[in-house]
Image: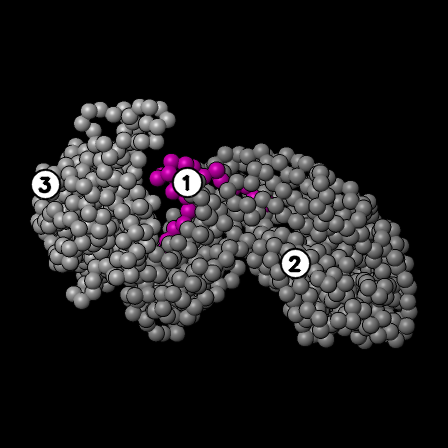
Amino acid sequence: MTFLALPAALLAAGLTVPVVTALYVLKLRRTPAAAPSTLLWAQAVHDLEANTPFQRFRNRLLFWLQLLALLLLLLAVARPALEGESAPKGRAVVVIDRSASMNTVDPGFTTTRLERAQARALELIDGLAEASGDGAAVLVFAESAEFQTDFTRDAGRLRGAVERVTPTDQRSRFDAVAALLGGMAEGGGPPITALVLSDGAFAPPAMRPGLAEVAWRYGRIGPEAESSGEASEGNLGVVGVSARRSVDEPERVEVLVSLVNTSTTAVSATLVLSIDGRPGAVATRSVDVPGAGDAQDADAEPGKASAIVRLTLPDTGVLRVAASPGGDLESDDTAWLVLPERRSLRVLAVGPGLGYARAAAEAIPGVRVEAMSIEAFGALGPADLVRNRQAGTGYDAALLGDGAFSSLPALPTLSFGVEVPVQGLRLVPPEAKGRASAWLDWDRGHPVLANLELADLTLYDPGRWVLPASAESLGVGLEGPVLAGVKDGGVRRLALSFALSQTDWPLYVSFPAFMDNALRWLTLDPGAAGRFVRTGVVSRFERAVGAGEESREVVWQGPERLASPPMGDGRGDLLFGPADRAGLYRAEPAEAVLPGDRVVAVNLCDAQESDNRAAASLVIAASAGTPGASTTAEVIGDSRRELWTWLVAAAIAVLCVEWLVYGLRSRASLA
Amino acid sequence: MPEAEPLITPELSARLDRLDLRSARVLPGGMQGERRSKKRGRSVEFADFRPYAVGDDLRRIDWNLYARLDRLIMREFYEEQDLAVALAIDVSASMGYGGPSKLLFAQRIVAALGHVALSRLNRTGFFALGDGVDGQLAWLRGRRPMAEAMAVLGSLEAEGAGDIGRASRRLAPLIPRAGVVVLVGDFYDRDALDTALRVLSAGRCDVYVLQVLSPEELEPESAGYSGDLRLTDVETGAVAPVTMGAALYKRYRQRLASFLDQTRETCDRLGARHALLRSDASVADVVLGDLRRLGVVG
């Protein structure tokens, strides 16, 4: 045991103990006065004893109780502490995990893991600030890592930084911590000791230079089943949610929900789906989620299950999916999804030779095809061609028939046997005419060619593609690549090396299926599967045209307040996030944002984070030069425990006893 | 008290000449005086008629009645006798307290009563009561010894621990016959007062208790006491540590009222008459007012 403020306690003892003793030994100095009789002053006779400068010390219980209370308080002033974790040399970094899994309340505790981590950090800081040679700093991490202080020996600043740490629903990326500290260590300077207070519920960091120079210490924050006798109930979380409208029946929506279960036993989960916050469920579904297996093995894979729920929702809306029982982490019990609205496509058919393609496209529900000559197409500018849904102008994709195209607008295209002006992409004509060819191979896993059978098709004199690095071959014929998938500056293009007149493909059922797949892939909308944003991630939203306030800040009100200053891109587009907490965020003013984006759903949806089982050890990659080598962080020992609070409590208890004794004696004397 | 200042002023003396001491009972006198006695005598105050008997003084036969009734009827008159008056002052040390001191006030009161008693030819004795009868001047009669009496009174000093009970035991045998006893003092010792009254009442004396307290005793706030004091009893030397304050003053006044009530009750029970006098009061107002109402003078 050490005393952190012994001189102060000795000084206080020197001042107060004599005073208390004197109160019992010294007596009042009184002014002498004569009186004809003291008879009538008899009420004050009990003061008689106090009228000499000193009196014989009398062994009084009250005196000893008061002295005991005083000594306890003096001992508290001396700040006795039980020795614990020794302070590291060099620079110390207290790393606090504030990811979603740290919101878990473990059995036997009433506070979250983050609150326990903060308390542990405060205990550590008392020793670090005084003993660390080059000071200490506080670093918090979740999706990103951020220093809260520079290196300082000011314990007050460090404590303030720790107390200001707020919880998040973000996933934890320890990579960010490793990058920061590894970079610092690599840059030289005093050695760094990282004291990581976390549940370890994250993937090990990737190897990088400098990590080996950091002394890693791990303070595990998790359940203590051995000591509390209570076992964790495990966690059931929603780790994925998406929705998709039926092509044939757009009012039909399929919702895919993925669940994980970290409990050792299988769980029969109940999914409750509701829409737009309206009371009552639009659907309820039970899902059996298998258990994680061995409870003692934190590396055992959690049980996983998925469910598809089919709903009839004619309009857009915000879908809420709640899973129960949620387990000991609430952040992933609920997920929200902004459902996609029904969408129609405007497709432009440019040039001749597109009869079959037009017919197949027009057969797709919601697709409208307009024909245009190559000359007219070339005369239109990008503003007329690129789809602007607010203005109701432009097209979603273009079918390119026979002809020459010197340039293409930023419009997805599906071309049939024509050169596409994409750098590096070249159509090589067949070396010999009059030869029949066929599809030799095609990417069956690609969305464009999924579930298609092309082996029976015949191709007449097809060309072959020479592909740049930005393109991929989706199908190969006898001569070479016959179908190229190109990403041209963010615009998708599909290029066939043959015209429809050079194949019998339109006679097969696979052609309209190909057209459907192709148009869907070309016009792929990320919102088509339902939109949500992950916590901690920044997203970009388009500002509504005509709002007239491109410079005005938009505020997103939800579990927290997020401000989106306009970007300097001339259009006033908005950046949303990163959001700390999951939930629904509504834009203010709403008219500044497109109607479909006025409500943003933010979810955790991370299987790694939902697996909130605390890791027994923290594995750190050792060095970049030795792949696979890793080391395990040392465990942080018990921090120094100060005892002054207990001493003050004991002093108060003694004073209460003293008061009780005094009260009883006073009552007895009055009686 | 300045020596040149007389105990009673000439103006008060002139007013006192019109007064006489009274007793509740008609007490037998020794010599002819100015007080009516039960005896028939030679005064001018008619008492009764009675038939003539051989040997009666023929000068008191009512000749008018003889003319009407043809019988000799004697006219009788009350005889005027003197009264034994004992004026006793408590001269214990506590009487020296106050401004003016209680003793000086008591001397002036006794001087005034002595003036009245001597002027009316009563047998008057002056007694100083301390632990016993510390001094006496008895029994005087008429105005001639008045100057001597005033001088003796003026020479009294408050000292020592008094015991009014023991002093009264000594005083009682000195009073030749039933008369009037006036006790002047502060009478803090109620047991001693009880003893004194029993002794003096047993001699069929009319006892008047004039209790003198100073303003400082009646109103301790005016005494200038403050803070923590170590009070010493001037007679017994007993020490009382007190811390002056409103609460203590209140409790003191309650005890004082209780003490005075008990003193008054003691006097009533033993047939004495009690009056509380402030030492800063006017002697003329007290004698002509309070003592007249009490029946000491009239």
Magenta-span inclusion, residue A195: no
Q: Residue at x 15, y 55 (%)?
A: B144
Query: Which comes sooner in the sequence, label 2 or label 1?
Result: 1
The answer, for residue A183, to whether it is visible in the render is yes
Secondary structure of the residue carrying tag 3 is: helix
Q: Residues within 10 Å of mark 2 (few under 14, many from 20)?
A: some
Q: CA distance from mark 3 to mark 1?
A: 100 Å
Q: Which residue is mark 1?
A: A108
Subunit of mark 2? Answer: A
Q: Which residue is mark 3?
A: B174
Image quarter where the N terminus of chain B lies is bottom left
Q: Residue at x 36, y 68 (%)?
A: A154
Q: Which residues are magenta?
A: A211-238
Horizontal placement of A263 versus A5: left or right? Answer: right
Q: Amino acid at mark 1?
A: Gly
Magenta-span inclusion, residue A234: yes
Q: x, y percentage for residue A581?
A: 58, 55
